[in-house]
Image (tube, rainbow, N blue to C red):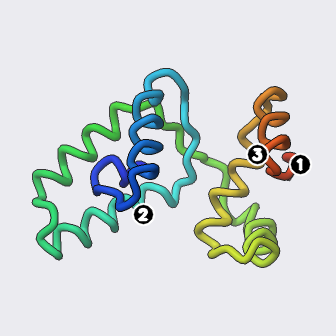
Amino acid sequence: MALAWLFERELPSDRERANRLLATCGEVSWWIPGLWHQEVSNALLVAERRSVLSQADSDRFLARLSSLPFFTDSDPVADRSTRILALARSQDLSSYDATYLELAQRASFDRQLNRAAAALGVAPFADP
């Protein structure tokens, strides 16, 4: 989602969603897996190599991201590898995407949020 703040999305609804999320970033804290940093860096590097961004553009974007309230999950991935692989298999996800899903399952203790997610058809969070 963070990269949608830098790269224009094709669908207007995607652009609106990304902008709404950016507008709320100062109001809430966001948990991200360690993998997120490599994904952002790789996307910036690919954009630089394709002459879509300059190094200065990438540096400014990273500085902007560093000012936002992101918290990197520090739990060892090795301890969760079996669960991540099981989620990837059961949900037909890449292991990268399953890493985000596994974190989401551990990150929310907000009962109201969990009820809202369930009302939208999101499976209830379980203990890892």
State the residue in front, 8 or 105.
8
Return the mark for residue 126.
1
**Given the image, on which type of amino acid does mark 2 rest?**
Glu
Q: Distance of mark 3 from mark 1, alpha carbons?
A: 8 Å
Give the percent coordinates (x, y) of residue 70: 48, 37
The numbered mark at residue 39 is 2
Residue at x-position 35% and y-position 58%: 9
Across the whole image, how many numbered discs are drawn on residues? 3
Residue 38 at x, y percent in the picture: 41, 62
Of labels 1 and 2, earlier in sequence is 2
- Left or right side of 84 for 121: right
- Crowding at mark 1 (Cα within 10 Å: few <14, some 14-19, many 20+): few
Name the outermost residue toward the top.
27
Dot 2 or dot 3, earlier in sequence: 2
**For residue 32, side relative to residue 105 (left or right):** left
Pointer 2: residues within 10 angstroms few (<14), some, or many (20+)? few
Circle 3: residue type = Arg
Q: Which residue is mark 3?
A: 106
Residue at the image position 72 percent from the left and 56 percent from the top: 102
How far, Cα to Cα, is label 1 from label 2? 27 Å
Q: Quadrant of residue 50?
A: bottom left
